[in-house]
Amino acid sequence: MASRVNIVVGRPAGARVVGLRPGRRHPQSSTMARPTLLRTASRWGTHGAGGAGRDPAVVDILSRLQALGSGPLCDADKGHRLAAATSDNPDDRMYDPIRLMCPNTMKLRNAPRIVDNEMKWPKMIGVARTMQLTRPNDFLAVLNALQEVGAGDVLAINTSGSERAVAGGLFTTEAARRGVRGLVVDGPIRDVDDLACPTYSTSVTPYAGTIQQPGEGIDSTPIMCGGVTVNPGDICFGDADGVLVGSVETFATCLDDAENISAVENQLMRGMSMGIGLHRMTNFDEHMAKRREGAESKMQFKDLNTLKFENVEPVDFS
């Protein structure tokens, strides 16, 4: 007989608690589980994600993000947005949400590649370096920025309404050589077949701009990119579904929940691969009946004899 998953409160000393829900107290603490990272808007230089010049806490966040997709991160963000709007806890209400670039215009331009005999889309995870072009259709400032970016960086560019390409195969190859994790361009790029690192843009054209205007330099200002603000030092996360931007503290807040959601989804996928129906692994029938009656209800997963949801927290699918 199916039973709801039981969560054991308490953990071995030193173990990391996975999946604390918004507003939930740490099981062994009277204080809220809340990251203490400070928002960082300084230049990160050319140090890589594991370099000595980068905060170890940021290095850990970037490393853990590698195993996630944008979906679980957005699901976690949704929960924290709700907590910020409804909680009486001042820490919850201070939550700064993840910013989603417009998925209708900001698109991944790379083709998928074969990894371990599977087609995979590239993923972009790194720390934002911002570039605001002062003259449209001129890419000299972008070429100059390539001298200053390095391993673990993501170069985000506002092209001031350019209609001509400001980056392409040559620039992305140089960026990849320097360990840059990707480019995000509010404007056009070209050479789609030759992009050497994950590259997002709002348009594509084969026609390149001029190379005359020096501009104001990298990280001189926050920029608008894909319809959202990108600050120097923000974390940029991109996959085939879209580009997410947020402060270090924002991603730290969402990370445990996103990892828990991903673990639950992986277990559901495993169950379906075993021939178990998705509805059977959730309280779908009960939830549907209550919602038809207008009663409060939440979609939840549940244990089965053949499939156990172990070491995960309950997830609100609402």
Image: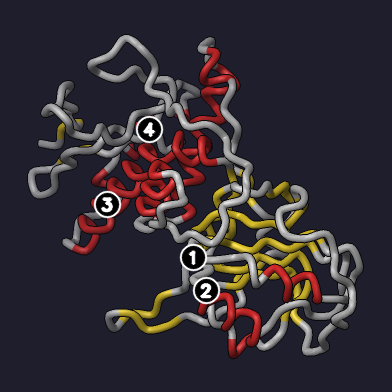
Kindly check if marks 3 and 4 are in contact, taking CB atoms under 8 A apart as contact: no
User: Which is in the foreground here, disc 1 or disc 4?
Assistant: 1
Question: Residue 5, located in which quarter of the rendered image?
Answer: top left
Disc with the residue nearer the chain's start (2 vs 1):
1
Compute the Cα span from label 2 to label 3: 39 Å
Q: Which residue is mark 1?
A: 151
SS under mark 1: loop
Disc with the residue nearer the chain's start (1 vs 3):
1
Question: Residue 217, located in which quarter of the rendered image?
Answer: bottom right
Residue 178 circle label: 2
Compute the Cα span from label 1 to label 4: 47 Å
Q: Which residue is mark 4?
A: 287
Give left or right: position of 150 versus 191.
left
Compute the Cα span from label 3 to label 4: 18 Å
Q: Which residue is mark 3?
A: 268
SS under mark 2: loop
Compute the Cα span from label 2 to label 4: 51 Å
Kindly check if marks 2 and 1 are in contact, taking CB atoms under 8 A apart as contact: yes
Task: Please tell me whether residue 147 is drawn above or below residue 68 in the rendered image.
Answer: below
Amino acid type, mark 2: Arg
Disc with the residue nearer the chain's start (2 vs 4):
2
Q: Residue at x 38, y 28 (%)?
A: 21
SS under mark 4: helix
Q: Quadrant of the N terminus?
A: top left
Q: Residue at x 25, y 18 (%)?
A: 27
In-front residue for pair 240/183: 183
Amino acid type, mark 4: His
User: Which is in the foreground here, disc 2 or disc 3?
Assistant: 2
Q: Residue at x 53, y 31 (%)?
A: 38
Amino acid type, mark 3: Leu
Give left or right: position of 99 versus 131.
left
Amino acid type, mark 1: Ala
